[in-house]
Amino acid sequence: MTDTRAIDGIDKSEPEVRAEIARRFHDRIPHIAALGLEIVDVSGPTIVVELPFREDFVGDPMAGLWHTAVGTSAADSACGLAVFLALPGLETVATLDLRMDYLRPARAGQSLVVEAECHHITRCVAFVRATLHQNTPDRPTALCHAAFMRTGRSVRP
């Protein structure tokens, strides 16, 4: 894994720094705020976000199930944050590929938790895997595998 310390004068190994970067990531991307995605833990290599249930997330009202696109959007945002925190410095990224494997439906009335980790970084691409669950990590609702393009452009802190 790439060393994330002291590039651009920012030490991403420090939990307080990671939390501030995650807060700014959240605040600067309107879609994340619109979804209501909450950052739970960014202190380690696996980041955790939670999406509290809302009635407008229901895709199947008869069965009481989340719409799968909402989980996909939460996974994309969580994976992007995992990559952003794993890269040295402050470099913008863009989703190249995102695959969702749905294992079971997400039930209405319960939050959706996404745990994402950037597991490999090359000069041009970063690779992430994520698990989506409803507070039962050993019973995921979906698995996600994603690739993000490194743009080489810096983000202002």
Image: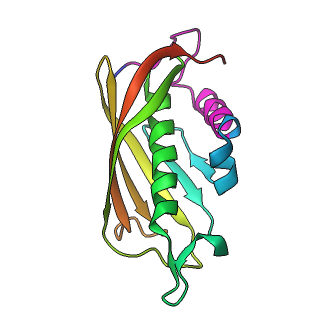
Magenta region includes residue 89: no
Residue 76 at x, y percent in the picture: 46, 47
- Say whether residue 47 is visible: no
Residue at 68%, 34% (x, y): give it: 28
Q: Is residue 23 magenta?
A: yes
Q: Please give left or right for residue 93 compared with residue 121 in the image.
A: right
Q: Is residue 57 above or below residue 77?
A: below
- The answer to whether residue 118 is left or right of residue 58 is left
Residue 156: image x %, image y %?
65, 16
The span shown in magenta is 3-26
> Number of callouts in the render?
0
Quadrant assignment, res 136: bottom left
User: Which quadrant, please, contains the N terminus?
Assistant: top left
- Which residue appears at 31% of the width and 16% of the height? 123
Out of 118 and 146, give the one closest to the viewer. Answer: 146
The C terminus sits in image quarter: top right
Q: What's the residue at 34%, 30% (across, down)?
A: 126
Q: Quadrant of residue 139?
A: bottom left
- Counting from the top left corner in percent of width and height, residue 12 is at 53, 23
